[in-house]
Image (cartoon, rainbow, N blue to C red):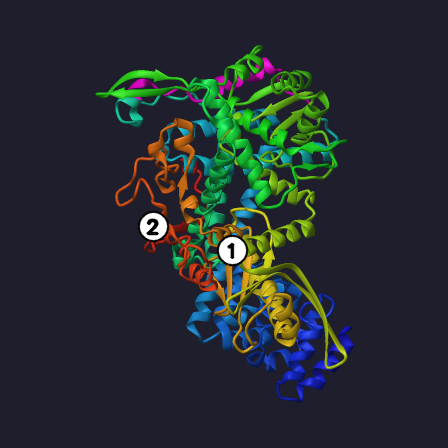
Amino acid sequence: MNKTKLKEALAALEGNSFSDVEYLFLKVNTPFKDKKVSDTFYKSDFASNFVKDLSQTDLWDEILYYYFSRGVNASTRFLEAVVGIDFKSAQGFILLYESYKYSYHWDTFESFKSSRDIKLKQFYRELEFLKNNKEYWDAQDNLHQEEILKFSCEDIIIQAISFFQKFKNYSPQNINDNSKIISYRLNLIHILNKFINAKRKDNSNNNLHSQPKYCIKTFSEILNQELPPLRTKEYFENNFDPKFLPKENVSDIKEQIRGIINFQFAKAENENIVNSILTGNAHFEMIDGNEAEILTNKSYMDYQTSLKKDKYNEHYLINKVIRGNIDELKGKGNDENDMWRREYIIKKYSSLEYFKFFNIPFAFKPESTESKVDFEKAILLLQVFAANLFPQGRFFGIQNKKVDYVFKRQLETEFKNVFSKRRQIDYVSVFEENELINNCIQYFQWSKDDVTGIINYLTIDLNLKNGQLINIEDTPFIKIGDLYFWLSALNKDLKWEVVLHRRFVRDEILAHNKQTEDTERDIAVLFENAGFESKPSYKYNYTIDNKTRISGDIDTLAYKEKTIFIVEVKNTYVEENPKRDHKYVLENFKIHAVNQLKKGEKYIRDNFPEIKKELKIDCSLDELNIQPLIVSNVYVGDENIFYEKYLKLSLFELTIILRDDLYSMRTTQMFKTLLEINEFEGFNIDNVSHHNPSGVPEPGQDRILKKEDLKLWKNDNNCSPFDIISAIKKNKIWKHLEFDNIVYSYSLGEYNSEADYLA
């Protein structure tokens, strides 16, 4: 439909009151979606005059989404009509899609400024602040980007690692807080990505070829020279008193690059706070010129809770690995190599279980290699390098405020013999190409083709001009000339299976349709094992009114005891980005998944005799309870019940419910297996965290959990539909993570070059 025909159709509908005719026209033609004509729809009399009627339909969220996410659709009249009847929804869409960035939308927001409504005037001030804040930080970022181009990649890497080690070892906030260190490590990886991408682009624009600035020996000498001095034993003996920290010499290059990195951390902090506002997780408390104070709310705490859920899936898969490989894990003694062997087995197999759980293939053929890359070998190489290519460090044992002993972290003997024959292991390990390949062949006992294929896949060559943005998290070997750089200090503690999962999605290696079909099949099997009749990937095609053909599919159907579950599966990849997550929840769960489920529900009602026979339904349509479920491999959105009916839960949560396996989710076998002590049976995972790695229970927390206290089914031998619905609605899987709402206060403003943002 072109713009002229759309105008004529809307004009014809304009004379009528809003009815099924108007609704069906919009449902079938969706003129608000079509980029070619959407502006005509939003600027029409029809759209503005029928706003109230439109808000009562299931198209409302889509209509607002397409309006506020595209600048060309801006219409003052439509905006005023929307705000007049649904300001809260309009506010949410404007913030989430940052409509103030579009000049056309910004012009329409002038109506807020001149409004007599106080809340609209205040909202305009907030939007103006966000707009100015973004423009300021973007301008500052461009200036700092120009500065970083003056330095070589090697110097940038050296100073980044030096700065991180200072933060890690000198900041009092990091004592017993590994989670903070991991968070800053990931931030620094993102910053280095930005710097190295800028360097490569600049070299390409100037037809420059990247060559190593230093030989390996010189690089190592400069790196160790630029690292902050080791902490003295007096520092530990005096309860980490900063006055006992050694004085660091700060060279000109160190000061300059640290200043640029410091700015990037400040910018990231500002973006995180702004994102809390954009996603509705916080609100403005006060605005004063270019400074503001914001306060978080319950949505902020809900999002933080969702970030904690992944560790339970991780331990659940580890427990499965331990149960399935118990003979291989039995000790051959408790020497250091036996402990390394057990740790590798558990890490490798749990990574494979992660890929099985999410139906990701173990072998793949990337464009960058001539043959398939074996995931099992790639993941083992990454884990071995991350664990061993790292300086041993020193740990002081304190007794009566005195150093009683000094402990050095032990490296695996075989690895040390192969990889540190020629040089010491540093916070950045550098190899010649043949050296790296030959060492891997010797240590892993793999073929040269296997090793070369894996190394090539995990390497970013700064001289390649393929346009692909560099990500040193999922391509951790950086090749400059004929040297390979492994950033030991930053590659520690990464979850390599998650890192590679993201890369597979980015490189479009995964066959998304097959992955979804496999997940649908797995969900059907879960229901079958719990006693349900089920069918995966159910496709339908039928005719209504003898002329309109309707086709679609229901990802999984499951029936039992007068309840039919219709399941919509949504696969994505894990990324801790609140803005992206909130958009995904809105677009893919609340809009798309709900629409698919509504179609599926209508099919069941219109074709009940057919579905009754296929699923052996033993009740009438009037007696049947149709319960829609949205199942995803991510946890965001779990707290939502869309339109008081559509339940969202993760694949992991559904697995635990249908297996009645909360005990395995809440406990860990790691201590029992690694230490071979039976008293650790049923050990509470919540006792172990980055803040509390020793596992000593915190006040009010059970050390050992009992299976009988963690039952989800009312009847041990029967999973009822009520058990499933009750577990989801009452949040039984995650109830232990619930806590009182804590309000945090944050400040927004301009960059303060005197402040230390990496502290």
Q: Earlier in the sequence, mark 2 or mark 1?
A: 1
Q: Nearer the viewer, mark 2 or mark 1?
A: 1
* Pointer 2 local density, CA inside 10 Å: few below 14, some 14–19, many at least 20: few
What's the residue at 59%, 31% (across, down)? 379
Q: Position of residue 587 (x, y in %)?
A: 59, 61
Left or right of 195? Residue 185 is left
* Pointer 1 local density, CA inside 10 Å: few below 14, some 14–19, many at least 20: some
Q: Is residue 221 magenta?
A: yes
What's the residue at 60%, 71% (across, down)? 601
Determine the image quadrant of residue 690.
top left
Which residue, given by chain and number where applicable, does mark 2 sit on?
709
**The C terminus appears in which quarter of the rendering?**
top left
Q: Magenta segment, which residues?
A: 210-235
**The N terminus appears in which quarter of the rendering?**
bottom right
Say what secondary structure mark 1 lies in.
loop
Q: Amino acid at mark 1?
A: Ala
Q: Amino acid at mark 2?
A: Asp
